[in-house]
Structure formats: C-alpha cells, structure tokens
Amino acid sequence: MDTLSHLADGFAIAITWQNLALALLGAALGTVMGALPGLGPSNGVAILIPLAFTLGLGATPALILLTSVYYGAMYGGRISSILLNIPGDEPAVMTCLDGYPMAKAGRAGEALSLSGIASFVGSFLATWGLILLAPQLVKIALLFGPDEYFALFALAFATLGGVSATNQAKSAFAAALGLGLAMVGVDTQTGVPRFTFGEVHLYDGIDFLVAIVGLFALSEVFVFLEHRHGGSDAAHKSMVIGRLTPSAKTLMKTAPTMLRSSVLGFIAGVLPGAGASLGAFLSYSMEKKLVDREGTFGKGDPRGVAAPEAGNNAAAGGALVPMLALGVPGSGTTAVLLAVLLSLNITPGPLLFTKNPDVVWGLIAALFIANVMLLALNIPMVGLFSRLLLIPPRILMPAVAMVSFVGIYGISGSPFDLYLMVGFGVMGWALRKLDVPLVPVILGTLLGNQMENNLRRAVTISNGDWGVLLSSPLDWILWGIAIVGFILPMVVGKVMRSRMQAARHGEAGEEMDEAD
C-alpha cells in the first residue's frame, strides 16, 4: 500500500501542465533523435541536456524531459531499421531481421505500429518492475559500507562494456581514462591541485555535462565532417507505408510474445552491463525457438518484430533500477542520466528514495505518462516520422553543434568550458576511430571521485589494512560478479555478435538471391 501511495504522490507531481508538456516534447524529440541513423538514445539525451538546463528546469521536470527523450529514442531507432534496414542503434539490429522484410512486403506501417505497441508493453511492464524491485534493492544497499561500495563501483566498471563490447581491453582503457579525468581538480583530503597544470578553471574538476556533450554530441559532428558530405542516404530510397495499424489477429498472435519478451528483457536490463542489446537478442532467440515452427522468422514474421522491441524497451526500463537504487548505471544512457542527477546535486543510491522521494516517484509516474504519449504519437504519425529520414545530415549536424555550444555556454557562462567541450569532442572522435567505447569514460568521470573516497575511507577505518576490501561475504560476492562480468562477455558476447552478424548476412544473402 505504501508503494501505491507513493506512486499516487508521483502522479500528483507529474500531472501538471508543465510536466505533461515536457513529457510530450521529450517523447517527440526522442523519436526524432532515434529515427535519425547513428544518433541513438545516448547521443539523443546528451544533445538535449543543455536544453533542459538552458530552460532553467528543476530536478523533476528536467528528468521528465530527458527520460521521455530516452524512451522516445528507443522507439525512434526502429523507424530506420524497418524502413531502410539501417539500425538506429545496436539493439535495433534484431528488429531489422523481420521488420525490413515486412516493409518490403508493403507492411511497413503495420511493422512500425506493432513495434510501437511492443515498445509500450515492454516499457510499461518494466516500469512496474522498477516500482517493485528498486525499493527492495535499496534495503540491501543500506547494508553497504565503504568497502562494499568500492567493490560495487568496480563491478560497474567491469561489466558496463557488457556483451556488446568488441574488446574488453579497450573498455578497461576507457574506464582508466575516465578515472584519470575524475582526478583532475583539488584533492578533497589534502587540498593539493592534481592535473590542473596551473589552470584555475580546472580546480573544481571537469564538469560532467561538458564531458558528456563533447564526447557524445560534438564527436558526432566531427564524424560527419569526416565521412558525411552528401545528403541523407534515405533520400534515395522510398518505401510504401501501407496500413498503419496491425490487425486484431496479429495483435492476438503477438501478445504472448510481447509478455514473455518483456519479462526476459527486464531481467537483462537489471543485470549490470547487459543492457538493451542482450534484451533484444535473448528475446528474439527465445521466441524463435518457442514459436517458429514454420521457419517464418527472418522473413517478415510480426512476432520477430514484437519480440526484440518488447525486450529492448523492457531492458531500458530495467537499467533504471540499479541507477536509482544503487547509483550505478545499467546502460550507457542511464550513465548520462546519472550525470544529470549529479549536476542537479542529487545523489542516486539508497538514500534517494528517502531524501528525494518527489524526484523518484515523479520520475516513475512520468515514465507511465511518456509511454502513453509515445503510443498516441507514433501510431497515427508513422508517416510523418518516417519523413524525418529525408533530413540530410548537412542540415542536422550544424543544429546539433549549435545546441551544444549555446547550451553549455548558457549553463556555465565560461568560454573555457566551450574550449574544453571541443577538446572532448576531438577526444570522442579519436576514440571512435580507435573503436574505444565512450560510456566507460563517462562512468569513470562520474564515479571516480566516489570510488576514490570510499577506498580511502575503507582503508583509513581499517588502519591501513587493504584486506578490508575482502572482509565481508558481500565483498566476495560483488568481486566475484565483477570478475565473471568482465570475463563472460569475451565468450558470450563473441557468440552473440557472431549470431547477430550471421542473421544479418543471411538476410542480405536472401535479398541478393531475390534480386537475381
């Protein structure tokens, strides 16, 4: 009953004209960001962070806007996947397998609407999972001491590369780089400046938002300057949208798939570092084994669209559980949201539910509202959003750069931060060229100081005994999960990626055979 009363309070906070308008704006902008190939949820949220701060929004309205963008971008990425066979982000790879064949068969509108409904079901059930699971996780987290928190942060670094990481050594390098950036500034214990090189602007450390906008948004502009000089690839392709809503028979056929995939995706999302990619892959693979008795998966089966869509959106909701309850992001986008919370002087973790219940429950209520708005927006406006694919990058990227510069300057009013953002943009471009993931860099910048403080506190309490890091059963469990989480993706991730590539190549081969 306490949970329901808290949720009712959350709806009382979320249902204001301002918050409803922000949820609608976030859902629409997120869909736009997700629909444009290459941006994805992490970049979409990062690009719009300056907008939230420029508007002078408080904690709850800012989070409502950005989480609506998050959910909207998760759906928007499916538009290019289904219409163009170009995944908007990695989880959308599995949607291409049956979504694009449906589109080629003249059922593009039906596939897009079905993906919207499956996304709604996955997100809706995941939000209920968040409500039920996060408070229970908080009770466990209250037992943590400094040594357990240090082990928890180590677990986050070990697993955030996840099964989608192509090279764990590069993920480890990125995490070390992020930890190094976190050390910039004045040491809180000794008062000695570290790595500031005499620059007074660095005495307070590196602003999370400057780093995030530079690494994600501005680096995208530099990548465009290097590779994308023409118009949009989508401008040369056309696709018949056809019927906009799936039939009742199709909905009945796919309903069990949506429910099963939502549960599986949510579990994958809660696991540290697993994320939406694993949720989509497991959901599609499980459904193919369970229901594909006629071999229709990969040839335009609606269940092949519903399964990964419900799975990856449920995983997106599940990734919010460790972020809110433990202060450890479960995915790249939740790492960006974590930076927003810290910039608003709100510390996620066990005390968040007691110190800032209005933020937590207002956010959860807003997730329900954003889901309904996304469903209401995307089904009738499928044709309009598909036209977004015609926007040439030469128009889009200058807009991204403008929002980044104006937003960051509006937040800090410091030209130095603009120079720093450009530096992070160049760094992000270079890391992308080397195929080094950006998310561990951000995680290191966000959690580095907390990790260092907890390590110092634990060692100080134990009078210099480093064995305190393995002094409790919970320490052993967390370190064990961290080791397994770092090693397992080298095996499981390789198998998953090879199967995803094989499925894509098989589909491409069939297309060539049809063309011949």
Image: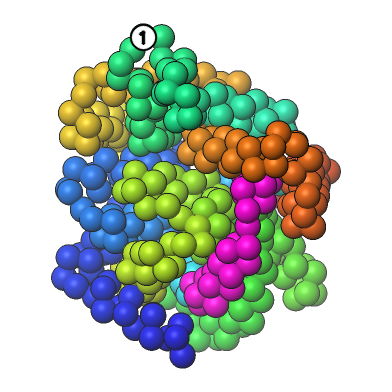
Name the chief secondary structure element in magenta: helix
Residue 129 covered by magenta stretch: yes
Q: Would you place residue 160 above or below residue 426 in this image?
A: below
Q: Nearer the viewer, residue 330 or 226?
A: 330
Q: Position of residue 486 (x, y in %)?
A: 75, 42
Q: Which residue is mark 1?
A: 198
Quick one: quadrant of the C terminus? top right
**Residue 371 found in image quarter:** bottom left
Which percent across, then down, holds residue 301?
Answer: 64, 68
- Is residue 293 among what the camera can see? yes
Can you tell which quarter of the image residue 166 is in? top right
Highlighted range, magenta = 126-154
Instruction: Please provide percent x and percent y for residue 285.
Output: 74, 62
What colour scheme does the image use?
rainbow
Q: Is residue 380 left or right of residue 108?
A: left
Taking the image as shown, residue 215 lies to the left or right of residue 204, namely: right
Furthest-front residue in view? 463
Q: Residue at x 64, y 73 (%)?
A: 263
Q: Nearer the viewer, residue 443 or 106?
A: 443
Outermost residue to the right: 491
Residue sitting farthest toward the top: 198
Identity of the residue drawn at 23% across and 69% down: 20
Q: Is residue 416 left or right of residue 204?
A: left
**Residue under the point 54% across and 82% down:** 251
